[in-house]
Image (cartoon, rainbow, N blue to C red):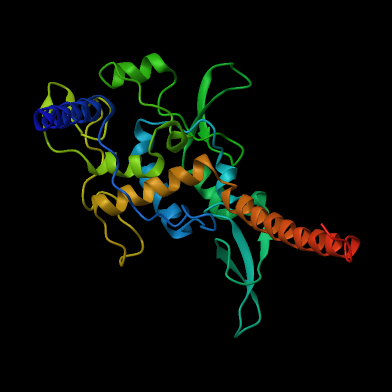
């Protein structure tokens, strides 16, 4: 009897697990992102490549309304510019990304790389003379260009499903960056009309077709693999940075605070011993 009950319980639990996976999606594949540990930091090379993947692929459908182009060049951003002294010539040279040692930060308004990124996008604005919509090159103060003027247009262009904004997608979705990475790698080729099967997506079926393919985004760094797995890893890293651009500064501050609290605890203990010395408890 006990064996029968145990077997039935195992079957029920297995059925519940299958049902849960079908409704909520499979657990994302674990991946050792550099930013996950309490003292971790962003791999800025991966963030830069991830921005390239977003810019060339994801931005065709997905907006990032919370980000402006200037954020890319602020301290802690993937395209922050520093002037670093050359050890041989002793002349200052531009260096994109935080250098290992030294370096003087260049204000975003003087960052030609961020300005070039912004100007490569056409932003719809209102002409001050005619009052009619017009396109102009982007400025660093502009928000990321939206692929569609409104949600109705977004749904009309995507079979009735509005692509979500990606500004904080790694915080908005259970599983965070590993979920994004697994989702982009998880298409198995099954289709149902305009829907595509992906076991990591809640419900298993989504309207977004597989957005990535091997070799789709040419990296300047030819040593980095140009595969779906690498693209997914890089864009997930970029989206995590976009959702939490001040993570590194917060962690550094946290370490300083913990060190201060440890030192304070030691001083308080020594003060306690001094005040109560010679007293029996």
Above-or-below relation of 267 to 62: below
- Give the quadrant of residue 260: bottom right
Quarter holding the C terminus is: bottom right
- Left/right placement of residue 217 relative to residue 95 reads left
Residue at 47% in and 35% down: 171
Q: Where is residue 42 in the image (x, y as percent from the top left)?
A: 49, 55
- The residue sitting at 63% across, 20% down in the picture is 129
Where is residue 170, by image quadrant?
top left
Q: Which of 148 and 136 is in front in this view?
A: 148
Residue 204 visible? The answer is: no
Residue 181 on image: x %, y %: 32, 44
Left or right of 232, for residue 172: right
Task: Give the x, y percent position of residue 76.
Answer: 59, 53
Which residue is rendered at x = 35% and y = 30% of the image? Answer: 61
Q: Position of residue 94 (x, y in %)?
A: 59, 66
The vertical placement of 145 against 250, above or below, is: above
Instruction: From the viewer's perspective, tell me whether residue 91 is left or right of residue 204.
Output: right
> Between 144 and 29, which is closer to the camera in this rendering?
29
């Amino acid at each position: 009897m006990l064996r029968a009950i145990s077997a039935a319980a195992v079957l029920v639990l297995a059925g519940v697990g299958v049902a849960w996976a079908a409704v909520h999606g499979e657990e994302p594949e674990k991946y050792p992102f550099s930013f996950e540990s309490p003292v971790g930091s962003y791999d800025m090379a991966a963030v830069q490549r991830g921005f390239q993947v977003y810019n060339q692929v994801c931005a065709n459908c997905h907006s990032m309304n919370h980000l402006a182009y200037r954020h890319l060049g602020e301290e802690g951003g993937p395209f922050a510019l520093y002037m670093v002294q050359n050890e041989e010539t002793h002349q200052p040279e531009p260096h994109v990304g935080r250098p290992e040692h030294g370096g003087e930060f260049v204000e975003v308004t003087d960052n030609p790389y961020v300005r070039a990124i912004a100007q490569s996008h056409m932003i719809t604005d209102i002409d001050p003379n005619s009052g009619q919509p017009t396109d102009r090159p982007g400025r660093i103060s502009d928000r990321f260009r939206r692929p569609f003027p409104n949600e109705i247009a977004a749904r009309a262009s995507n079979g009735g499903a509005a692509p979500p904004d990606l500004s904080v997608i790694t915080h908005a979705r259970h599983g965070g960056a590993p979920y994004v990475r697994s989702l982009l790698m998880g298409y198995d080729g099954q289709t149902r009309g305009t829907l595509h099967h992906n076991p990591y997506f809640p419900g298993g079926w989504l309207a977004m077709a597989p957005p990535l393919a091997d070799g789709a985004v040419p990296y300047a760094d030819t040593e980095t693999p140009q595969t779906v797995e690498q693209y997914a890893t890089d864009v997930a890293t970029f989206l995590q940075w976009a959702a939490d651009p001040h993570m590194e500064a917060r962690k550094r501050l946290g370490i300083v605070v913990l060190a201060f609290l440890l030192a304070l605890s030691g001083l308080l203990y020594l003060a306690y011993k001094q005040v109560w010395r010679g007293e029996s408890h």
